Image (cartoon, grey):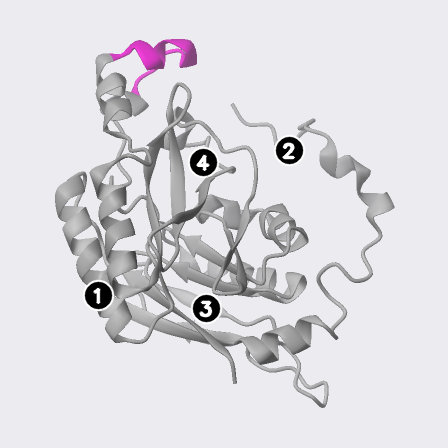
Amino acid sequence: MKTFTIATVQYNCHLPDQKRNTEMGLHYVKEAKNLGADIVLFPECWITGYAFPDIVESNLPANEIENHPDFKVWYEAALDESSIHIKSFQEIARQLSIGIVITCFTKGVKRPRNSAFVIDRDGAILLKYSKVHTCDFAAERMLESGTEFKVCEFDGVKLGIMICYDREYPESARMLMLKGAEIILVPNDCGTMKPRLQALSTRAYENMVGIAMANPPGENAGCSCAYSPVVWDNEGKSVDNTIMLADEMTEGVFIAEFDLDELRNYRSKDMMGNTFRKVNAYKQFLSDKVEAPFIRT
């Protein structure tokens, strides 16, 4: 049996202490390696912390936010590929021969982006993904959105990334599936997990992909998880596709092991994913028009 083992980090980072968060993260990478992981998945915005300047509560017009001194300090704290913190994760990946999905705010054109880096066993960055579906109803309206979904190959496995609120939109996982993803990794930081777990299980089922999600612990939070696309047994009877599900409060590195032979065999035979879709009926998906009851200010 060919397996692919993902370690999901269910810990809280320390806002917004980048040095401490990096040191903690390196410790959890070592723990993941000791647990036999091929790759370790961190929650959303691990290095920088998921923190915003206080001006988010102000009534500043959108075009004035970037000139506020607190915004400028926050933007300058965002990272890029040359950051010592990113390089620290690249170095430990090389030393331990382990993959890492590490997260942080990164510098966009004018505003930070909410990003994840996929680092290979040699310490090279395979992919940088910036969150497409930013939470524009909340503080993330201060971010720049990413513009595309991306897939890379790690150890012969095609991996896609979507971040937190991306998960709420079926198009995110669908696009990653269309780009060839076999397993989708989800850095996350939110609560009210029950409906979101159901959605992740559904994303796995409808796209015939594996899914793994890492979320910080806390009341009504946690629940780091992994789901298989396999929902039927050989006799056609439904089976539980949960590979791993943590509780809300427990801190730890939780292991999810995917049977790649089973996953690939299932993907080659079942009727979901990109098998019998009738795409000619989907033209309205490309329209950006928003009508009631979905209009928000």
Magenta-tinted stretch: 58-68
Q: Magenta span has 80?
A: no
Q: Is residue 219 visible?
A: no
Q: Nearer the viewer, mark 3 or mark 2?
A: 3
Above or below, 160 relative to 259: above
Residue at 62%, 33% in the rendered image: 294
Q: Which secondary structure lies at badge 2? A: loop
Q: Residues within 10 Å of mark 2 (few under 14, many from 20)?
A: few
Q: Which residue is mark 1?
A: 30
Q: Position of residue 254 (x, y in %)?
A: 32, 71
Residue 130: x %, y % from top left: 45, 38
- In the image, 241: left or right of 122? right
Residue 9 screen position, x and y as percent: 29, 61
Cα gap from disc 1 to disc 3, whole angstroms: 21 Å
From the image, tell me which residue sits under label 2: 293
Q: Is residue 61 magenta?
A: yes
**Is tag 1's residue or tag 4's residue first in the polypeptide sequence?**
1
Q: Amino acid at mark 3?
A: Ala
Query: For the residue marked with disc 1, what is the amino acid?
Result: Lys
Q: Residue furthest bottom?
A: 235
CA distance for labels 4 and 3: 24 Å
